[in-house]
Amino acid sequence: MSQKTIGSIINVNELNSGYGNSHVLFGVDFEAKEKEITIVVGPNGSGKSTLLKSIFGLCAIYSGEISFYDKKITGLAPHDIARKKIAYLPQVDNVFSNLTIRENLLIASYTLDSKTFSKRIPEVFETFPVLKKYEKSKAESLSGGERQMLAMAMSLIRQPEVMLFDEPTASLSPKLADEVLNKIQQLRDDFGITIILVEQNVKRALRIGDKVYLYANGKGVFTGKPDELLAHPELSKLYLGIS
């Protein structure tokens, strides 16, 4: 069993989880510290996304425990976890394409009263100025990178303490990927949000991370600082294709 360290906000101990009879994670330990970016990397099928879905209540938990501020959240429904100020941003279908930017933000703020919503909107548009420009446009008109910005804004308006990102730069150009990762870093730096980031753009992600977990075959094979992972050429080459 993993030991909780000072400043830890999310803790996962001996987690076995998956989908129905499909066992994906095997005895996984994980922690994310407050106001840090924790990166999760690994080859396809290694269980990275399953970790996020397990934390957010979207997977079957066979055994183990997940806690938030030392309080058990294992088995809670996603809407209950969301109310604890944990936000999950899936790779796709993370915005309402047929609604305007403002309507998306309004739906996302279902836990807020109208006065709080009105107060939060200016801060959100200040953080994501491109959304202010397209405020009355439908989300379907946005580029891939802009959609990711909208998904982040929809989470930010609820003032989350933790944000779970599942491959936010997938299918984006290198330039747009950098813009999205820079915004994620800004969420940590400006708002003190704890970030857990599953990412395939390994080198880019490691530049903004405070800690990294490497998964393979549903198990953790490395935990440490990003530069420590890059200093392990055999791990980087075998699991990440970095030479």
Image (cartoon, rainbow, N blue to C red):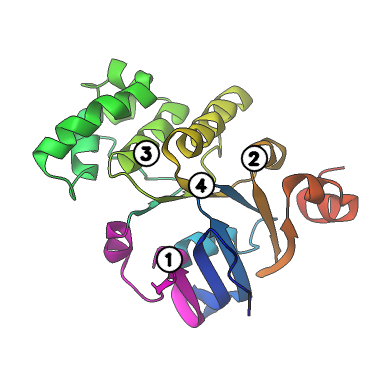
> Disc 3 vs disc 2: which is toward the camera?
2
Whole-percent x, y for residue 45 in the image: 63, 61
Q: Is 199 inside the magenta-drawn segment?
A: no
In three-dimensional space, the C-alpha distance between marks 4 and 1, rounded to whole angstroms, equals: 14 Å
Q: Disc 4 residue type? A: Lys
Residue 212 seen in this snapshot:
yes
Q: Which residue in the structure is indicated by mark 1?
A: 68
Residue named by callout 4 = 35
Q: Amino acid at mark 2?
A: Ala
Question: Would you call the spot at circle 3 few (<14 residues within 10 Å), some (14-19), or many (20 or more)?
Answer: many
Quarter of the image containing the C terminus? Answer: top right
Q: Which residues are magenta?
A: 55-84
Mark 2: which secondary structure? Answer: helix
Callout 4 environment at 10 Å: few (<14), some (14 to 19), or many (20+)?
many
Instruction: Read off the residue under disc 3.
Output: 151
Q: Could you tell whether 119 is left or right of 128 in the image?
A: left
Q: Mark 4 to mark 2: distance in Å?
A: 16 Å
Q: CA distance from mark 3 to mark 4?
A: 20 Å
Task: Using residue 61 as the reference point, say whether residue 26 is left or right of it.
Answer: right
Reply yes or no: does residue 70 show up in magenta. Answer: yes
Q: In terms of sequence position, does the residue under pointer 4 or pointer 2 come before the other?
A: 4
Q: Position of residue 68 (x, y in %)?
A: 43, 66
Query: Can you say whether 63 is above or below 171 in the image?
Result: below
Could you tell me the amino acid type at mark 1? Phe
Amino acid bearing label 3: Ala
Quarter containing the N terminus: bottom right
Say which residue appears at 89% left-offset and 49% top-offset: 233
The mark that comes first in sequence, 3 or 4, is 4
The first of marks 3 and 2 along the sequence is: 3
